[in-house]
Image: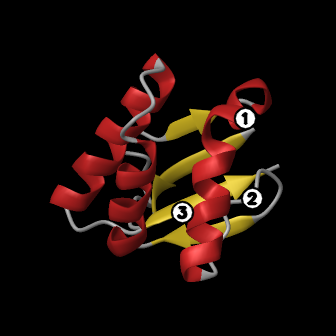
Amino acid sequence: MLDISYLSDDNNEHPSFIIKDSEFKLFDPAFTELKNQTGVYIDPYGKCRIYPSHQKILISLLSKNNESRVIDFISFLKKAIQLDEVLFADGD
């Protein structure tokens, strides 16, 4: 499971986005391409920060995917960008 939340959210006031292990295959091609472009890899077992510039790249990479979970994630990313939030990905 991969939990993506706002880095600044110390009080759990903002929603997080959970990617289950079974869903990871929907996102992995975009995460791998993000790594190729920036060196940042969103790992289902590690931790990383996802800056707004990375979020914009992910939106671009995922925009052609019509799966509902991907569309939900894109919405989550767009909201984070509007708030200029750094996201924290925490895998287990």
The amino acid marked with disc number 2 is: Asp
Q: Which mark is residue 38?
A: none
- Above or below — where is 18 with respect to 39? above
User: Is disc 2 surrounded by few (<14), some (14 to 19) or many (20+) residues within 10 Å?
Assistant: some
Residue at image mark 3: 88
The amino acid marked with disc number 3 is: Phe
Q: Earlier in the sequence, mark 3 or mark 2?
A: 2
Residue at (47, 41) in percent of width and height? 16
Q: Which mark is residue 43?
A: 2
Q: Name the spot of residue 43 as percent of width and height, x first.
A: 75, 58
User: Is disc 3 surrounded by few (<14), some (14 to 19) or many (20+) residues within 10 Å?
Assistant: many
- Asked if residue 14 shows in the view, the reply is no
Cβ–Cβ under 8 Å for marks 2 and 1: no
Residue at (60, 63) in percent of width and height? 33
Task: Tell me the distance, in whole angstroms, between the alpha carbons under discs 2 and 1.
Answer: 12 Å
Tell which residue pokes out farthest to the left in this image: 82
In which quadrant is the N terminus drawn? top right
Q: Earlier in the sequence, mark 1 or mark 3?
A: 1
- Residue 2 vs residue 68: left or right? right
